[in-house]
Amino acid sequence: MTDTGAAPDRPGVIALPPLIYLVTIVLAFVLALAVPLELRVSKPVRWVAGFLVVAGIWVAVLGRGAFERAGTNVNPMQPSTQLVLAGPYRVTRNPMYMGMAIACVALAVATINGWLLVLLLPTWAVMHWGVILREERYLTRKFGMEYEEYRRRVRRYF
């Protein structure tokens, strides 16, 4: 087997993003059992946060649906077959990841779990450097100027 030096046709993300968030959530709740770190928020704020958990999940679902309608892979471990520029991708380049982030912050407030807020900081760093920037390099390599133009028009985050 010879190495042609060509980059593989996938982003090379370090882990599946939903798994990254799931590990964060589980770890936060385990830590809360061992060493409680409760947030001080009112019941009405917790109810609003519960609504925002659902809204964040909905944003992620809309992003996934746009990928499915476009016929490209949702799994970032697989090749992208085309750029998705419609739906929530007109507002942010990462609606699935933004939706998961919103849902996690809201879940922390709704469940008064301070550990979840603490753990989200390193989680976002992992998402930024281990997933999003890798995907951006991959999409630039694969789609060139079309992706660069999209990057100029649409924000990475909200």
Image (cartoon, rainbow, N blue to C red):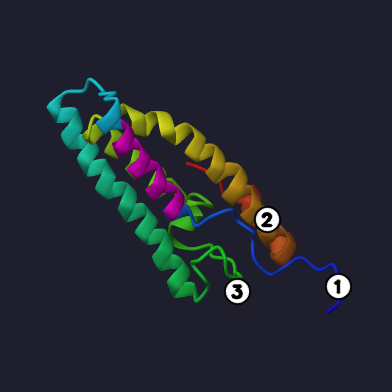
Give me the residue at 38% from left, 55% from top. 60
Location of mark 2 (residue): 149
Give me the residue at 47% from left, 41% from top. 158
Say which of marks 1 and 3 sits in front: 1
Determine whether, in the image, residue 39 is placed left or right of residue 10. Answer: left
Location of mark 1 (residue): 4
User: In the image, what residue type sits under mark 2?
Assistant: Glu
Say which of marks 2 and 3 sits in front: 3
User: In the image, what residue type sits under mark 1?
Assistant: Thr
Q: Are marks 2 and 3 in contact (CB under 8 Å)?
A: no
Which part of the image, by quadrant, shows the N terminus? bottom right
- Magenta span includes 24: yes
Q: Position of residue 132 (x, y in %)?
A: 58, 49
Residues rendered magenta in the picture: 19-31
Give me the residue at 33% from left, 32% from top. 31
Sort mark 3 into few (<14), some (14-19) or many (20+) by Cα contacts within 10 Å: some
Report, in whole angstroms, how far the alpha carbon at label 1 lies from the one at label 2: 29 Å
Location of mark 3 (residue): 81
Q: Main secondary structure of the magenta part?
A: helix
Residue 57's place in the image compared with 120, above or below, is below
Farthest left residue? 43
Would residue 96 be seen by someone viewing this image from the given angle? no
- Magenta span includes 21: yes
Sort mark 2 into few (<14), some (14-19) or many (20+) by Cα contacts within 10 Å: few
Using the image, tell me which numbered label, if any, was put on residue 136.
none
Of callouts 1 and 3, which one flags the residue occurring earlier in the amino acid sequence? 1
